[in-house]
Amino acid sequence: MKVRTRFAPSPTGYLHIGGVRTALFNWLFARHHGGQFILRIDDTDHERNVATALQPILDGFRWLGIDWDEGPDVGGPHAPYFQSQRSDRYEQAVTELLERGVAYRDYATAEETNVERELAQQSKKRFIYSRRWMAETETEAAAFERDGRRAVVRLKMPREGRCEFDDVVRGHVQFEWELEQDHVIRRADGSYLYHLASTVDDHDFEVTHVIRAVEHLSNTPRQIFIAQGLNYELPRYAHLPYVAEPGSSNKLSKRKLTKYLKDDEFGRIYNHAADIMTTLGVSIDPESFNPVLVDFYQRVGYRPEALVNYLLLLGWSLDDRTEHFSRDEMVKRFTLERVNQSPASFDPQKMMAFEERWMQALSLDEKVAVTAPFLTQLGLLSPVLSSDENARLRAVVVAAGDRLKVAADIVNYLEFFADDTTFPYDPKAFSKRLRSEGSAERLLAFRHTLESLEPFDAETIEAGMHDFVAANDIKISAIIHTVRIAVTGKAVGFGLFEGMAVLGRNACLVRIDRALALVTNKDTP
């Protein structure tokens, strides 16, 4: 048996962390068994579907390296892969279910159904639909239609017995049939609902394993009922634990961002990314700029390998020691038997630890490749780097070291790519360090030292400053902070001497001259 799994997102918004974890487990299971992974678009809910939402979903999967063997942009022998394009097939299934007596046309109005439900509540009884407006023959249907009624199609669920199946993760599961309602599978307007469409598609696409979040466990009996009513062979079911919010067992939700931001670690990764967006001049869309969504991480330059590695461990573990996996190791090691049943809490701090590890594992060339686009976006580098631009960026990346936690952190060092005569100063720091008594005079004197240093590298600049300090009988703090503000505009950053070497002698002298002119003219920086 060729293993075939699927993930079926609805184009109602951006990729949710929890959904991607489910897709990843499906992908890994298929790849582990040498099988196929299908991407299907469940777009039966026309009111909620967002036409522009599909592309970010596809882009997100590609960014994460989760490819699909059949589906949108790929095709395959079972096309189309959009439920909105498969209505003819669903109508065939509805007809078969009606003919076999496991579904019926129901002509009740919403108001009539609600009355029955309210009466049950008032009597403190469980609501069981009476099927009073059920039409099992054409004659009965015609009579209802003469009254102007329109029919939905409902499943004629059993009223006794049990639905039992073995879940790969949950073990033996059973549901009482009497607790199931007569679920609608076709609306009065002719559109089809999830349970029918999903069951038919899983059969038609030859899906062998339905691997999905545990919140779908309660859907399984009605889908089994549909499959059995159509004489389909059942797939194996595996229901994964849901991804929980930080420090809680409640399901992670994009709608609870305000609540999550009260968590220090969650707030830290959000604010870090928000600061980057501000520097890039990009407005924040609350619908997509959310650590619960994959797009959030892609936009600020997280490593996809880090996110995938972290998601692997949300509900799965190899042992108590191993956490870091290459893509090949994930495929080799993944089994459903190692999936946990308990919810897996999203831990922002741990996810950032994975990001830092994967970022630092990049080669220098790779770091240059992932950071350059953010500077290009600001117009500070060419789309294709010149040799000088490449050399400058490489030097900054090396000097920044592990301060580059995500690729977009390069925007914290714009001073090394800005024009020498226009880059901004921190006004507060400038006033403190350059307008204090004697600061400008010492800076001018040190400028003369810089003119003669050979070679102009970090080691020589540092030695030159120590010689200057000794010759003038001052503390190094009396000059080093002044120089930093003059050449970088900032009070903090990586090593000053490394930064000056990156800028080069001429740039440092031009920047010092500019700072001195501002002091002399009493201009506001």
Image (cartoon, rainbow, N blue to C red):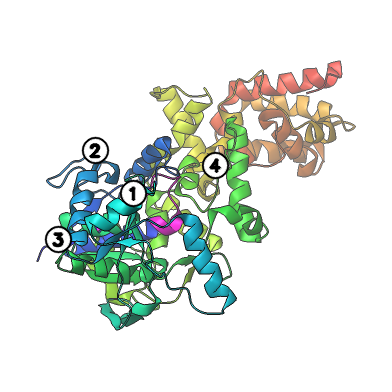
Name the residue type under label 3.
Answer: Gly
Q: Which-is-in-front pick, marks 2 and 4?
A: 2
Q: Which mark is residue 309?
A: none
* Label 2: which secondary element: loop
Quarter residue 208 falls in: bottom left
Q: Amino acid at mark 2?
A: Asp
**CA–CA distance in space, label 2 to label 4:** 33 Å
Q: Earlier in the sequence, mark 4 or mark 1?
A: 1
Instruction: Give percent across and percent down for residue 18.
Output: 43, 59
Kindly report which numbered mark, 3 or 4, lies closer to the viewer in this rendering. Answer: 3
Mark 2 or mark 4, earlier in chain: 2
Main secondary structure type of the part rendered in magenta = loop
Residue stretch rendered in magenta on the structure: 6-19
Kindly identify which residue carries mark 2: 73
The one of 299 and 235 positioned closer to us in this rendering: 235
Residue 409: assigned label: 4
